[in-house]
Amino acid sequence: MRLSRYFLPTLKEAPSDAQIVSHQLMLRAGLIKQEAAGIYAWLPLGLRVLKKIEQIVREEQERAGAVELLMPTLQLADLWRESGRYDAYGPEMLRITDRHERELLYGPTNEEMITDIFRGFVKSYKALPLNLFHIQWKFRDERRPRFGVMRGREFLMKDAYSFDIDEAAARVAYNRMFVAYLNTFARLGLKAVPMRADTGPIGGDLSHEFIVLADTGESEVFCDRKLVEMAAPGHDFDAAAVQAVFDERTALYAATEEMHDVAQFEAQTAEGDRLSARGIEVGHIFYFGTKYSAPMKAKVAGPDGQDTEVHMGSYGVGVSRLLGAIIEASHDAGGIIWPDSVAPFDVVVINLRANDEAVSAACEDAVAKLEALGKDVLYDDTDERPGGKFATADLIGVPWQLTIGPKGLADGVVELKRRATGEKISVSLEDAIARLTA
Amino acid sequence: MRLSRYFLPTLKEAPSDAQIVSHQLMLRAGLIKQEAAGIYAWLPLGLRVLKKIEQIVREEQERAGAVELLMPTLQLADLWRESGRYDAYGPEMLRITDRHERELLYGPTNEEMITDIFRGFVKSYKALPLNLFHIQWKFRDERRPRFGVMRGREFLMKDAYSFDIDEAAARVAYNRMFVAYLNTFARLGLKAVPMRADTGPIGGDLSHEFIVLADTGESEVFCDRKLVEMAAPGHDFDAAAVQAVFDERTALYAATEEMHDVAQFEAQTAEGDRLSARGIEVGHIFYFGTKYSAPMKAKVAGPDGQDTEVHMGSYGVGVSRLLGAIIEASHDAGGIIWPDSVAPFDVVVINLRANDEAVSAACEDAVAKLEALGKDVLYDDTDERPGGKFATADLIGVPWQLTIGPKGLADGVVELKRRATGEKISVSLEDAIARLTA
């Protein structure tokens, strides 16, 4: 992609109402533009990251056996009356009346609708276990939206819903999502720790939040340091395997501020392993049994022919919020440092003298070779001065910068810089390409 | 994907309120489920097709130089007051009040918002030409939603917006989208004819609808038969090349019922070439000059340093509607016949005796080999009887059916059926795979 033909409106200064670093950097790097309080347009660079995150979340859901569908943004109020949540949900629910005076709402979550889809089609235990997910825009009318996409009103969420014949099977489904989430966040370059959580308005018996540790996190969390260092569990989704992962992680102390118990923390955790840190919630999973299937009559015939209410869980990932969380966890004074897996481009090729034919030809050659090898390349072909180009490249956080100028060209070298470390080397173009595609 | 672990709820009979064949088949084949009048959930099979269509639309937009972003579904009413459309739009606009009594609306289109984004960032003619598109859910509160996704209320639309320094440049942008649309619809397996159209509530001077011909189309259209047979123009987006395509197509008569002029049709078209047919609108493009940039003050400094209002166009494709249009144009008594490019799976492997270990092993081998070659495979591993499996495979319209049963296995053959023609051949598995990956 040629920068001169792209739409990447960077800002020198963040607007003064952006209080946290991820919000400031998302505005400065041209990722988002606010359209109303808590409602954002995703500019091209931001959309690229959003889609990469979405795709990783999707792949890890599918590897865990979940099947994707897509529910609409608007829902009938009557569906929420069936579960009893329509009146209970409060002012965070955006209530809408259409031209025929029918009551709709902009879905803040989809337990009711997925239960309705399930009961409309599934009649036998033989279709279970079933886990359906979608990745769709949601709306929660936050009283005080702030922190950019971290506490927006219109936001992109992945929500999965599991259906099982009994509690034991539902616990397997829960454990599978627990494992899928650990894999997901690891691929996103994040250290996310599962913490026992309050179930809140979703309800139910069992719930974990997945918390990213970042100095600028929204709340205080407490956990055993060993949890932070554990590797992703991988893709064995056998019932015993996921139970073992669940047991291993939950044997160690981890709690959000609201669930924290100092005495238990100290009893359970060696002094040197007691970690108190700031955290950002990026995922939340729930097992809630028959809370929705009972009032909404979502039943299947069991092996004995008797109808039985299905046991359900729901599993959310804040896809748009993750951009903010990743930036909070990975930035420096120069700007964003994207993990390779979610970077909007793999490499930015910087032309130091765009009006020089030989330099431009060398840049175009580099771009073509990298693209042929499957790399996403941003080509800075503008006539901006070099200092501005380097500052922009640092700000937008592309993992690699490949700089070509007249002097290097004469010497047969290009400069390759790793954004995360700042390390620079002068090598031949062939060497640089080999390193970028290793 | 194993059918036994998938979610594909097919119906024997279409609900009686589904009046047109695409709506009936989308319900019967388990593509969609209605959630409210004109509001649908996309079940897994429908979502797969929707995403394939969306990706083809996206790729053809990008090849024409358009850059993707993503605007939110909700917009501020005040933005529409700037253009004067808030009051003019009428009851099709879904108007919403949030908890702080701010007026929002669910975007039916995005001319105002994209103009606001443009004016916020672009100050110089040097950034032009610029064409920004997004693929996002829209809402139009149709008085009488019907025909499934063909006239839904919540629908997925690709809308692009071009910005140029003057009318001549804007006409080039218009022609590029004209060409991109011809390429897009051809890749979708459709014969779509551009027809001069009324500009309606978008406004402007110049507009074309792209109409798919189908016996069950919503309206009558008239055109020169030669237009239907022309091949896609390809990807030369040079100003002269796109003008030549535009001139070649628009030299021939083509008009929707509302724009039809019998005398002109007869004067312009040889008798044998006069085609009167039913059509379905799948795209609509507009050039409207400064209709939005003037009231909203979207100006750039020109080469002479003077501020000038930009000339704009907008370009819509009904992505979700296209599923209905494709089915209207491609089905038979047995069900849907998906064009290869948008089929939810490339091939369905049908196991004729799922409780037979040798047959199942052969099927799993075939699935693994096809998937390793990059094919999307649906594997019917259920214990349904063969007749039911064949009927389902026909109904859901996957282009190829590969059937493996005990008798064929003993003879070393599988049966390969092409859904579109019904042609069946008995060949070795290796032969079948070679044909599927040719």
Image: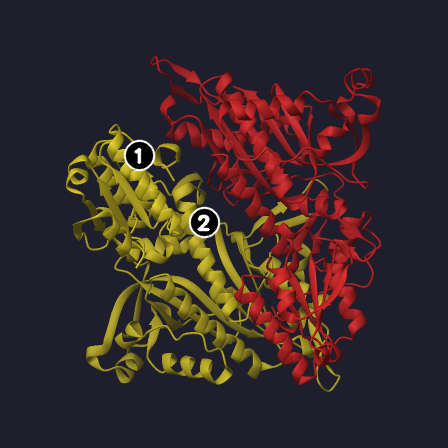
Chain colours: A yellow, B red
Q: Is residue A435 visible?
A: yes
Query: Residue B50: image x %, image y %?
Result: 62, 51
Of residues A362 and A61, the one drawn nearer to the viewer in this rendering: A362
Q: Is residue A403 above or below residue B27?
A: above
Question: What is the C-alpha distance between the residues marked 2 and 1?
Answer: 44 Å
Of residues B244 and A337, the one drawn nearer to the viewer in this rendering: B244
Query: Residue B423: image x %, image y %?
Result: 77, 59
Q: Tell me the crowding category of disc 1: few under 14, some 14 to 19, or many 20 or more residues within 10 angstroms, Cα based.
A: many
Question: Mark 2: which amino acid?
Answer: Arg
Residue bearing the label numbered 2: A143
Classify residue A27 by image quadrant: top left
Q: Do callouts 2 and 1 point to residues on the same chain?
A: yes
Residue bearing the label numbered 1: A381
Q: Is residue A297 above or below residue A418?
A: below
Quadrant including the N terminus of chain A: top left
Residue drawn at the location 37% of the way across and 55% of the way down:
A342
Q: Residue furthest bottom?
A: A304
Q: Chain of mark 1?
A: A
Classify residue A193 by image quadrant: bottom left
Of residues A101 and B20, the one drawn nearer to the viewer in this rendering: B20
Question: Mark 1: which amino acid?
Answer: Asp
Q: Is residue A186 left or right of residue B237?
A: left
Q: Tell me the crowding category of disc 2: few under 14, some 14 to 19, or many 20 or more residues within 10 angstroms, Cα based.
A: few
Please report whichever mark, 2 or 1, sits nearer to the chain's N-terminal start.
Answer: 2
Classify residue A298 by image quadrant: bottom right
Of residues A362 and A249, the one drawn nearer to the viewer in this rendering: A362
Residue drawn at the location 55% of the way across and 44% of the way down:
B136
Q: Chain of mark 2?
A: A
Tell me the SS state at disc 2.
Answer: loop
